Image: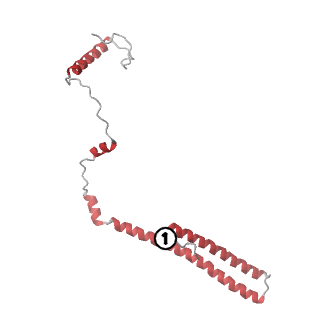
Amino acid sequence: HSWVTQRQYCGCPIRNNIITKKNVNIINTVLSVALRSFSSGTSGVGISMPSSPTSSWERGAKMVKNTDTTNQYLEHIRDTHDPTMHIKTIEDELKGTMGKALGKQGEKILANLRGMEQELKDYETLLETLTICNPKVIECAKRYNDFREKAKVARWELLVHRQAIGFIVNNHKH
């Protein structure tokens, strides 16, 4: 018997959704074969049911089941170079760089302290011969104060460097 009639509209994308007599014969044949094989249990034209869903780790495990991890090139590199030694070398270079930065910051503080000491000596020497209101004495006091401010900033920078490197104990003791 016929499932569809000629020129009947359906949801199939065959010739602008209009079924011709030729297409009706093809569709009827396919449907009758599918119904016969489905009802009789034969596998002529079978309907495959979707497989049970698998999780992503199961699919990944199936993909990497029999992988070969040997690689002559990598084995040669591993025999020639020890990665732990490279990491140790990099760590040593990094520690050396951090130590130099701390040393330079310490030198900056000491240079400003030496400048303060020199200006203090000059100030005391000037006071022996001049009055405190003399412009030379006032300039000497201003230079001393400038060195003092620079030393305070350099000390703050040293604390920041120490904390950045990881020294967090006894940073604020004088």
Coloring basis for residues: secondary structure
Q: Residue at x 35, y 68 (%)?
A: 85
* 145 on left or right of 4: right
Of the 4 image quadrants, the one containing the C terminus is bottom right
The percent coordinates of residue 95 (x first, y second) are: 45, 71
Relative placement, left or right, of 135 versus 89 is right
Mark count = 1
Picture quarter containing residue 19? top left
At a point 29% along the width and 10% down the height, the residue shown is 2
- Kindly identify the amino acid type of the residue bearing the numbered disc 1: Met
> To which residue does mark 1 refer?
98
**Residue 77, percent from left and from top:** 29, 62
Q: Quadrant of residue 83?
A: bottom left
Question: Which residue is the extreme one toward the bottom?
Answer: 128
Nearer to me, 67 or 42: 42
Q: Nearer the viewer, residue 39 or 147?
A: 39
Q: Residue at x 29, y 63 (%)?
A: 78
From the viewer's perspective, is residue 49 above or below residue 70?
Answer: above
* Image-quadrant location for residue 94: bottom left
Q: Label 1: state its secondary structure.
A: helix
For image coordinates 52% across by 75% down, the residue present is 103
As drawn, 28 above or below 169 = above
Q: Position of residue 74 (x, y in %)?
A: 28, 59
Q: Quadrant of the N terminus?
A: top left
Label 1 Cα neighbours within 10 Å, binned few <14 / some 14-19 / many ≥20:
some
Residue 171 drawn at (x, y percent)? 55, 72
